Image (cartoon, rainbow, N blue to C red):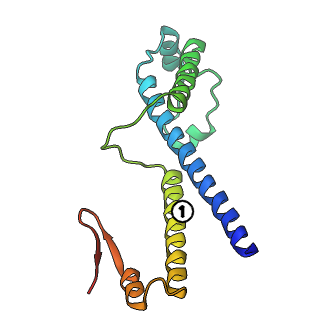
């Protein structure tokens, strides 16, 4: 019984962590999308235009990496950007914000967490099926048929022959 208690404790921890990290990654993705939208709404000031005109920004990648420019944007524009980031985080965290159905998730963090979550669920199901077979709750034929079952997109579950 102690082994099952430890397994339950581990499963509870892993499941909670999976949902927590998937949620955090989705919130970050949503905030990034909103922030990008808000940035497009910020108009540069006359000071920003003067800074851009007077800055001698290198064209070479290496020189650009070494380039040290203390003033790139005006304080007003920097404040607007900072406000936009805070607003994007607040909306993604506390309001119902969702991207469209055609949104493609590019975050490797979200994909990694979803993959780990799927692996966890698959492991739990396989262990449960193995226990059912060992306890003779399902027969060997049923177990072997389930073992080769695949999930098909539109038609659901099917068995290979």
Q: From this view, report whether residue 64 is shown above or below residue 107.
A: above
Going by the picture, which residue comes out furthest to the top?
Answer: 46
Q: Quadrant of residue 63?
A: top right
Quadrant showing the C terminus = bottom left
Q: Residue at x 49, y 70 (%)?
A: 122
In-front residue for pair 74/83: 83
Q: Quadrant of residue 12?
A: bottom right
- Residue 125 x, y percent position in the rendering: 50, 72
Q: SS at mark 1? A: helix
Q: From this view, report whether residue 21 is shown above or below residue 91.
A: below
Quadrant showing the N terminus = bottom right
Going by the picture, which residue comes out furthest to the bottom?
Answer: 140
- Residue 143 x, y percent position in the rendering: 42, 85
**How many other residues sit within 10 Å of disc 1, few (<14), some (14-19) or many (≥20)?**
some
Going by the picture, which residue comes out furthest to the right?
Answer: 2
In-front residue for pair 26/120: 120
- Residue 120 x, y percent position in the rendering: 55, 66
**Residue beneath disc 1:** 116
Q: Residue at x 52, y 22 (%)?
A: 84
In-front residue for pair 105/10: 10
In-front residue for pair 102/117: 117
Q: Residue at x 64, y 31 (%)?
A: 68
* Image label count: 1
- Residue 127 x, y percent position in the rendering: 55, 77
Q: Quadrant of residue 3?
A: bottom right
């Amino acid at each position: 019984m102690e082994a099952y208690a430890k397994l339950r404790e581990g499963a509870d921890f892993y499941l909670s962590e999976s949902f927590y990290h998937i949620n955090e990654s989705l919130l970050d993705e949503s905030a990034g999308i909103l922030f990008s939208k808000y940035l497009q709404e910020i108009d540069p000031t006359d000071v920003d235009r003067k800074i851009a005109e007077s800055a001698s920004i290198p064209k070479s990648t290496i020189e650009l990496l070494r380039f040290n420019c203390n003033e790139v944007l005006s304080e007003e524009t920097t404040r607007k950007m900072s406000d936009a980031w805070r607003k994007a985080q607040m909306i993604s965290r506390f309001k119902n914000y969702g991207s469209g159905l055609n949104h493609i998730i590019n975050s490797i963090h979200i994909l990694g967490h979803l993959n780990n979550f799927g692996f966890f669920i698959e492991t739990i199901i396989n262990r449960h099926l193995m226990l059912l077979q060992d306890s003779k709750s399902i027969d060997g034929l049923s177990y072997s048929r389930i073992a080769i079952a695949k999930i098909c997109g539109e038609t659901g579950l099917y068995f290979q022959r």
